[in-house]
Amino acid sequence: MADAQGAQRRQSRIRDMLAGWRAHHGEVARNSFQRLLATPVSSAMTWLVIGIALALPASLYVGLINMQALGEAWDSTARLSLYLKMDVDDARGKALAEALRKDSELVAVQFTDRASALAEFRAISGFGDVLDGLDENPLPALITVEPVAGLSAEHLGQLQQRLSALPEVESAQLDLEWVQRLYALVKLGQRLAITLAALLALGVILVIGNTIRLAIESRRDEIVVIKLVGGTDAFVRRPFLYTGLWYGVGGGLCAWLVVAISLWVMSGPVARLAGLYGSEFSLDGLGLVATLLLWLSGGLLGLAGAWLAVARHLGDIEPK
Amino acid sequence: MAMIRFDSVSKRYPEGHEALSRASFEIDEGQMVFLTGHSGAGKSTLLKLVMLMERPSQGQVFVNGQNLRNIGRLKIPFLRRQIGVVFQNHQLLFDRTVFDNVALPLIISGCPHQEIGRRVRAALDKVGLLDKERNNPITLSGGEQQRVGIARAVVNKPPLLLADEPTGNLDPQLAAEVMGLFQQFNQVGVTVLIASHDIALIKSLSYPIMSLKGGQVTRQPATEAEVPFDG
């Protein structure tokens, strides 16, 4: 009976301790945020520095996903244009088209005879008068084929070679070279973004570390007193870690704002450009996951910077 | 049982000065003892050894039954929570109220919120500053600041109270008041060790005196027989 009561008392004491610990964390978090707000200009400058540093790789990331989206939009409609030799008549061209429809690597085949090609060219180009002056139709017949989706660039190249080797075909053109170049560029951009992100992350850690170092210096007396009356290292560290966290999270928010504003500024011109190409393309934003990731990485970098400063400088401050 | 025991403790500083030289003494639980000696005789060093602000070069120190040699850096805070300390320069923080200064040891030891208010007010009441809890300590007089320091030292009811020249900056009347407070805490069972060179004040009170000279501690019995002393 007495044991049970003792256990109960012990349990409630642990509960009290936990509640006190939680309350203390909440209080320290609030308190360190209020300290940042008490010096709004210098805090805002730090937030902005971190924000810009994080916004650079974030914008590069947004640019890359948009380029990739652009590439994929074209990739899915990769086409080969087979220009037939001039001596191949329409009947033979149609027969070839029929044969190609049975090809397992092609999903769509469209035959355009020489007369239709001329009519189409006349309608689109506006060179009607010039064409009227010619004695005969200068345009070859054309078979447009669409390969099955998901072929690699290499595979597409092989397909192009096979088709251009057909006796009726003068040349086979793959409308894909620029997509390949775009992919190579995106790959390069990704490397660049990762390198830049790593460098700037280091920069953010150092900026926050230095800011926290100054905060530690300005609260030296308080640290000494806390150590004198029995504060643990964790207790002394806590407010500075929260300060670092708030710097990082605030910087993440700034970065998000910078990216959002840049996108908004660019969306008008991009829509006009896409309109000129007859495309529905519009800029993708950061998205929810990337936004959360930006905040999270801001917060983590802030914590890391604070840890660095705290580990280096708190040990030096001992009561004398 | 001894609250503080020094077992042939020496403390040499890197620059060669020897503050303590094989000093041995004991202070029993519940005693109140004065520590005297001219400035530089090692009074502060002795207190710092008790709080583990310094470690001895030789010998062993026991506090409240613990051999301080076994207390690593990470456990020092938990030793200090058993010791209330009053400083000559009181070490108050001027960026917060009297209440928050006194509450600091309780917050550090994870005391529940309701309990903090109750205990801080009890401590402030004891030193007669209950009406000043919302003030900034910088607005208080020297004597009041020292009393805030005392309230902070006793707020978590430590079994041991150390004071380093607690009356150094006070006029005789305030000094006597502060000493009266220490006597009250001693009467409820707190072991008190006060370093002071205010010989006149010490002699007027009947407590045992330890004097530090040449790195050695010598004990004199209480000046009057009314306080028992078993040294």
Image (cartoon, coloured by chain):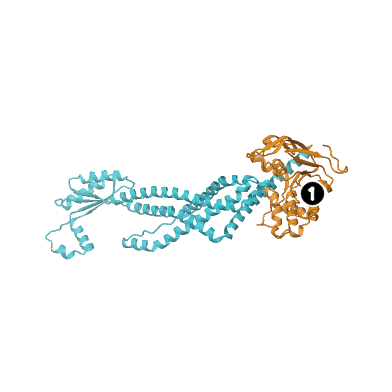
- List x then y, in percent, for residue A15: 69, 46
- Using the image, determine if residue B217 lies above or below residue B172: above
Horizontal arrangement in the rendering, residue A140 relative to residue A26 (left or right): left
In front: B152, or A180?
A: B152
Taking the view exactly as shown, the residue that stands out farthest to the right is B226
Chain A's shade in the image?
cyan
In front: B3, or A74?
A: B3
Taking the view exactly as shown, the residue that stands out farthest to the bottom is A129
- Using the image, determine if residue B22 lies above or below residue B188: above
Res B133 quadrant in image? bottom right
- List x then y, in percent, for residue A74: 32, 53
Res A66 quadrant in image? bottom left
In front: A12, or B130?
A: B130
Chain corresponding to orange in the figure: B
| Structural crowding at the residue carrying mark 1, measured as other residues with C-alpha within 10 Å and reported as few (<14), some (14–19) or many (≥20) | many
In front: B182, or A204?
A: B182
Residue at the spot 20% in from the left edge and 45% down from the top edge: A166
* Quadrant housing the N terminus of chain B: top right
Horizontal arrangement in the rendering, residue B216 relative to residue A298 (left or right): right
Q: Report which residue position mark 1 lands on.
A: B182
Horizontal arrangement in the rendering, residue B99 relative to residue A272 (left or right): right
Q: Amino acid at mark 1?
A: Phe
* Quadrant housing the C terminus of chain B: top right
- List x then y, in percent, for residue B226: 88, 43
Residue A248 visible in rendering: yes
Q: Secondary structure at mark 1?
A: helix
Res A267 quadrant in image? bottom left
Residue at the spot 21% in from the left edge and 46% down from the top edge: A164
Q: Pinpoint the chain carrying mark 1.
A: B
